[in-house]
């Protein structure tokens, strides 16, 4: 095993050429004599030389490195989002640097500061609160931010927002439970209360109020499967609740599986459950969760467009449309009473 990285100087010495000749050989479009190129390539192959892309970044206006920052990467939808986005970045000649801030929300500003030290072209915030100081730090360094399902403070430049139409999704969930005949419902939004989750819950409640249907709100715990488990025990311990909307699939799955396997209830006969996201796990035959879908492909393409666009393009705001995906966790509309 080599004790150090092979450098361009090592290649130059073995090939018997100047270091600048090595640099030109590995620079697209640069002029170099065919014989010199052949000698350099042979030496590079023999030594196992690879171009130092980080060093090359110092001489470029924009790097090929994109920073992804998240705090709940185990969430089924976010993990699918990371999978899709990193594959898209690679296909477009971009590299990814992923920071997992699980349990370290207060350190997000320091994490982004570290990313800026690597001269990333864009920072994508997948989850977690976004302090104003963080955005100003990125703006001061000329780095774009992409916020996914997060609010944008006023007077902050070089920021692209991408968000699902959460309010429309919450209303879809409410109308579907009403059509299923649910008349005593609950919404579980955890204690994180981010803007997207609040918008989903508020729209759900508003539709239910229009139909004079009471809504119990559960807003404790983190945005996790375990919160859904706890909510199911709290909401379904006594008979009555016949429909539950979890503002994420992860929460809804916790509710549904607890109702079925711990409380002995039938889903959807005894209680209908609906989620939000359409994470791949929701379509598993063991779950078949009815959910509001925010298109993963649309989200990925919108994020990629923001990353690959002009560095000084005006900030943009892109809405991802939502739709209801019917599965087996909600009673058929014909069951309405």
Image (cartoon, rainbow, N blue to C red):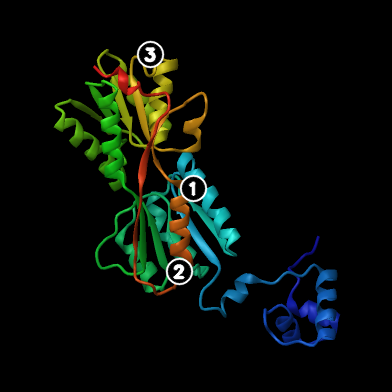
Q: Position of residue 328 (x, y in %)?
A: 42, 23
- Left or right, 247 with respect to 124, comes to left
First in sequence: mark 3 or mark 1? 1
Is residue 193 among what the camera can see? no
Check whether the beta carbons of the residues at disc 2 and disc 3 lie within 8 A of each other: no
The alpha-carbon separation of the residues under discs 2 and 1 comes to 20 Å
Label 2 to label 3: alpha-carbon separation: 51 Å
Which residue is at a point 48% across and 49% down the rendered structure image? 297
- Which residue is at 54% across, 65% downward? 65
Instruction: State how far apart marks 3 and 1 are (Cα).
Output: 32 Å
Circle 2 or circle 3, nearest the eye: 2
| Residue 274 place in picture, x, y as percent | 35, 29
- x, y percent for residue 105: 39, 49
199 to the left or right of 116? left
- Measured as percent of width and height from the top left, residue 141 is found at 41, 73
Label at residue 146: none
Per the image, the residue denoted by label 1 is 81
Element on which disc 2 rests: loop
Above or below — where is 281 with respect to 86?
Answer: above
Q: Earlier along the polypeptide chain: callout 2 or callout 1?
A: 1
| Identity of the residue drawn at 38% across and 13% down | 265
Q: Is residue 48 visible?
A: yes
Residue 153: quarter of image: bottom left
Q: Furthest residue to the front? A: 334
Locate the N terminus and report the quarter of the image it occupies.
Answer: bottom right
Residue placed most toward the observer, 38 or 233: 38
Which residue occupies the foreground of this view, 44 or 214?
214
Q: Which residue is mark 3?
A: 265
28 or 102, nearer to the observer: 28
Position above or below: 107 against 291: below
Disc 2 target residue:
309
């Amino acid at each position: 095993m080599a004790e150090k990285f092979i450098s361009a100087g090592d290649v130059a010495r073995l090939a018997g050429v100047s270091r600048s000749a090595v640099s030109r050989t590995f620079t697209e479009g640069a002029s170099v004599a065919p014989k010199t190129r052949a000698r350099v390539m042979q030496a590079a192959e023999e030594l196992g030389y690879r171009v130092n892309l980080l060093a090359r970044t110092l001489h470029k206006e924009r790097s090929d490195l994109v920073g992804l920052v998240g705090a709940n990467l185990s969430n089924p939808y976010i993990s699918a989002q990371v999978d899709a986005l990193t594959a898209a970045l690679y296909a477009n000649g971009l590299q990814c640097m992923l920071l997992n801030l699980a349990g370290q929300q207060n350190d997000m500003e320091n994490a982004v500061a570290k990313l800026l030290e690597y001269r990333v072209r864009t920072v994508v915030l997948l989850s977690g609160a976004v302090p104003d100081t963080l955005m100003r730090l990125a703006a001061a360094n000329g780095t774009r931010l992409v916020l996914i399902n997060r609010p944008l403070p006023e007077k902050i430049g070089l920021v692209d927002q991408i968000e699902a139409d959460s309010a429309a999704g919450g209303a879809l969930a409410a109308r579907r439970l009403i059509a299923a005949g649910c008349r005593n419902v609950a919404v579980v939004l955890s204690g994180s209360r981010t803007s997207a989750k609040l918008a989903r819950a508020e729209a759900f409640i508003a539709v239910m109020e229009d139909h004079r249907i009471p809504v119990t709100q559960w807003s404790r715990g983190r945005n996790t499967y375990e919160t859904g488990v706890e909510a199911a025990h709290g909401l379904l311990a006594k008979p009555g609740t016949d429909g539950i909307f979890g503002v994420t699939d992860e929460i809804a799955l916790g509710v549904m599986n607890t109702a079925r396997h711990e409380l002995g209830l039938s889903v959807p006969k005894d209680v209908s459950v609906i989620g939000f996201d359409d994470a791949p796990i929701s379509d598993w035959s063991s779950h078949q969760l009815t959910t509001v879908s925010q298109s993963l492909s649309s989200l990925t393409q919108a994020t990629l467009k923001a990353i690959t666009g002009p560095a000084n393009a005006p900030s943009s705001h892109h809405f991802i449309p939502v739709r209801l995906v019917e599965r087996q966790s909600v009673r058929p509309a014909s069951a309405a009473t």
